[in-house]
Image (cartoon, grey):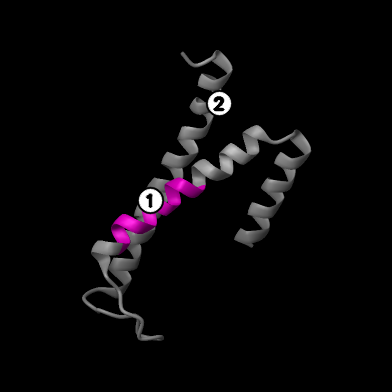
Amino acid sequence: MLSPKTKRNIGRVIPFGVLWFIFSLIYCRLEKGILGHLDSYPATGVSYNFGRSIIAIPTAGMFMGILTETFKILSSPALAFLTDYVMIGIMI
């Protein structure tokens, strides 16, 4: 059996993985909508495969959400602030 603390921590981590998963699905659909029927990116010529992207990007997004929140929960409060600061810095 899992301890109550472990159950609570898992309950705190899972929503972030789901949130990142949903937003990465939205990103994939937007990317497909923007590219339309093109098989490659116009600016770079790199090939684009929607079937591969719809699996890989949400999976990686969910993993990153779970990983980020796990670091925030398991670290000290000062380190949790640092991870928030780094994530905001990456977004800007």
State the residue lying farthest toward the left.
Answer: 37
- The residue under the point 50% across, 49% down is 64
Give, as a three-letter code, the residue at label 2: Asn
Residue 9's disc number: 2
Alpha carbon of mark 2 to alpha carbon of mark 1: how far?
21 Å
- The residue under the point 68% across, 54% down is 86
Left or right for 34, reference 7: left
- Taken as a whole, is the magenta stretch helix, strand or loop? helix
- The residue under the point 68% across, 58% down is 89
Across and down, in percent, residue 80 comes to 70, 40
Q: From the viewer's perspective, is residue 49 above or below residue 6?
A: below
Which residue occupies the foreground of this view, 32 or 46? 46
Give, as a three-letter code, the residue at label 1: Thr
Q: From the viewer's perspective, is residue 8 above or below residue 13?
A: above
In the rendered structure, which segment of residues is drawn in magenta?
53-64
Which of the 4 quarters of the picture holds residue 69?
A: top right
Across and down, in percent, residue 41 comes to 35, 80
State the residue lying farthest toward the front.
Answer: 1
